[in-house]
Image (cartoon, coloured by chain):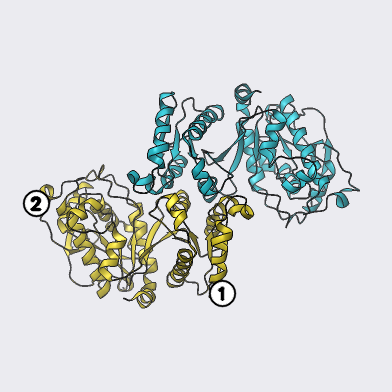
Chain colours: A cyan, B yellow
Amino acid sequence: MDDGAHTLPVVGLTLGDPAGIGPEIVARTLLDPGLRDTVRCVAIGDAAALRRGARACGFDLTVRPIAARDVAPDPDPAVVDILDTATVTDADIDAAMPWGRVGAPAGAAALAAIERAVRAAESGLVDAIATAPINKESIWAAGSTQPGHTELLGELTGATHPDTMFVVGGLKIFFTTRHASLRKALDLLTPQRVDAAITAAHDALRVFGDDEAPVLAVAAVNPHGGEGGAFGDEEIEILAPAVARARTRGLDVVGPVPADAVFHQGLRGRWAGVLSHFHDQGHIAAKTFDFDGTISVTVGLPILRTSVDHGTAFDIAGTGTAEYASMREAVRAAARFAPSVPKLRNRWAV
Amino acid sequence: MDDGAHTLPVVGLTLGDPAGIGPEIVARTLLDPGLRDTVRCVAIGDAAALRRGARACGFDLTVRPIAARDVAPDPDPAVVDILDTATVTDADIDAAMPWGRVGAPAGAAALAAIERAVRAAESGLVDAIATAPINKESIWAAGSTQPGHTELLGELTGATHPDTMFVVGGLKIFFTTRHASLRKALDLLTPQRVDAAITAAHDALRVFGDDEAPVLAVAAVNPHGGEGGAFGDEEIEILAPAVARARTRGLDVVGPVPADAVFHQGLRGRWAGVLSHFHDQGHIAAKTFDFDGTISVTVGLPILRTSVDHGTAFDIAGTGTAEYASMREAVRAAARFAPSVPKLRNRWAV
């Protein structure tokens, strides 16, 4: 009997910071029977960390180090595969990487897992990676100077403009600015930046979408889309001209659309994507609509990477209580977008 | 057999601008059998306008003018009651108030309906009013100088600080600022204004809630709640001190909470209310979560008023195609909050 396992996409799940909830949510995801028909999962990181995370959840599982793509049919459900970075032993892990604590060994382990994951994706050992959360201070203690995953992945792949796309329901959400204060973000809303954001977003819709002619809606920033200038002029001065320029470049872009309608319309299928302009504009929409079902995909990389959108939760790490829905959805999204890998490799090869 | 009809709350539905979709959505709501067990509806406005709206929807109904509270049991489902303002006749309405057109007669009719509704609520003829949309230019043409319903209701009741509360799911959402550009709204975020908004919101939670000790969460304005000042200082400088001051005043207020989590948490029941600071902050959350189910309640009035949160839709007025879900939900909310009428009358009596 052919169960089709050899055709399943393979997704690598990095453990993230071993002192955080990453190993627990990866263990729970690896054991989720609901994923078995659509994806083959492999952990990436320290086998000792995965074993410790599984124990915290009360799981009795066997961790099997692998070195090559393995999609043999009918895997034993109690055995989980890992690309073992082996930075720590079972005997040392509690002392070296205590639960819920910032530290260089945990940071180094997180970095090693990410690098291994990137190489595995580049070589085709996995089709995509889904990343568990890391701790900034720990990776800094371990010598990295990057502020987060996205920049780390840029450094490791040589990609120059990695960016974040949210996927929620059937909608893709993009951002003109993200990690800036709201005041600063308003200042950053320049014609050049909006042009670039529209182009990148539309590009990503073509790479990740099924639709050859996707429509991108550009959100407004002011109430009622500025109401003809009565409530702000960014729509008139910046956004409408940028939409017009994009259309002359042949992109199917509409807007600016009042932001309290545009996400609803997109979720109902009217738009393939929405360009939001501030962190919370897109985040409020996605996370209020479906908190655990919102996943992020890094666009602009030559590899496919999805991610949870929560932190290491040091306060509950090691207790076995962490919710793994976001990791499960990140894996599902990685599997769903796996057919896009040739397109994104072609588009964003460095 | 007592069907309990005499104990049902009575809600008055203003027709709004007769040239807009108001009469159609009111007609559809009056005929909705799903409302019959929980509320007794009465239209308020021109009987000629309601008849024309019903005809546009293809309904054959009898409009019965009434002059007093009537909650006789077992009403005829094909007869709808109206407090008839009689500003126009069936013979004249198409010429005086053509569908989809701005005009003084339509504006005057909308104003007459609102005034009649306020008086009916004050006298107890109805327990609450649910308002259909009006057109600003038409009411201005008819001599009003008010920018919208809320201010009109303030003028008619003498209330000095009417304000908007959104209700979506079980959550109540408030606003520190609303109809201002995002830049201007940031400037308006002063300690005084936030203090007043917190007080008003908490007050409204007590008036409209079942909970004697409601918790209000104050949203942050910057990404990750400012992340300790890295992404903006409004949380540190303005919001956290305002929350602390509110707590010393004995109000159960928490925050600032990152805005991409606070609405989700509220919808899950963690908070009775959320204070948002900008129009779109609260609007994106509510309308992306449940576009048609988001209704607005005016707080600070001595009468109970709920409202649709859409416009007159002049482009489709008279076609019988308007969606009435928002009006139906406004009526449901009016019925649900009717037990709060003694509390709000007491609290906001002028």
Local crowd size for mark 1, using a 10 Å CA cut-off: few (<14), some (14–19), many (≥20): few
Task: Report whether residue B209 is seen.
Answer: no
A141 relative to B56 in the view: left or right: right
Q: Position of residue B217 (x, y in %)?
A: 54, 63
B5 relative to A120 in the view: left or right: left
Residue type at the position of mark 1: Thr
In the image, farthest residue toward the top: A346
Residue type at the position of mark 2: Asp
Q: Position of residue A233 (x, y in %)?
A: 38, 43
Say which residue label 2 marks: B92
Local crowd size for mark 2, using a 10 Å CA cut-off: few (<14), some (14–19), many (≥20): few
Question: Dot 1 lies on which element?
Answer: helix
| Vertical order, A202 against B158 (above or below) | above
- Tell which circle, 1 or 2, labels the residue nearer the N-terminal end: 2
Of B80 and B133, the residue lying toward us? B133
In the image, farthest residue toward the right: A91
Task: Report whether residue B349 is seen.
Answer: yes
CB-based contact (under 8 Å), mark 1 and mark 2 = no
The span from disc 1 to disc 2 (Cα, nearest Å) is: 61 Å
B9 relative to B45 in the view: left or right: right
Q: Residue at x 53, y 75 (%)?
A: B249
Where's the N terminus of chain A, which quadrant?
top right
Camera-side mark, 1 or 2: 1
| Vertical order, B202 against A81 (above or below) | below
Q: Residue at x 73, y 42 (%)?
A: A30
Say which residue label 1 marks: B248
Of B236 and A279, the residue lying toward us? B236
Count every numbered label the image shows and give the total: 2
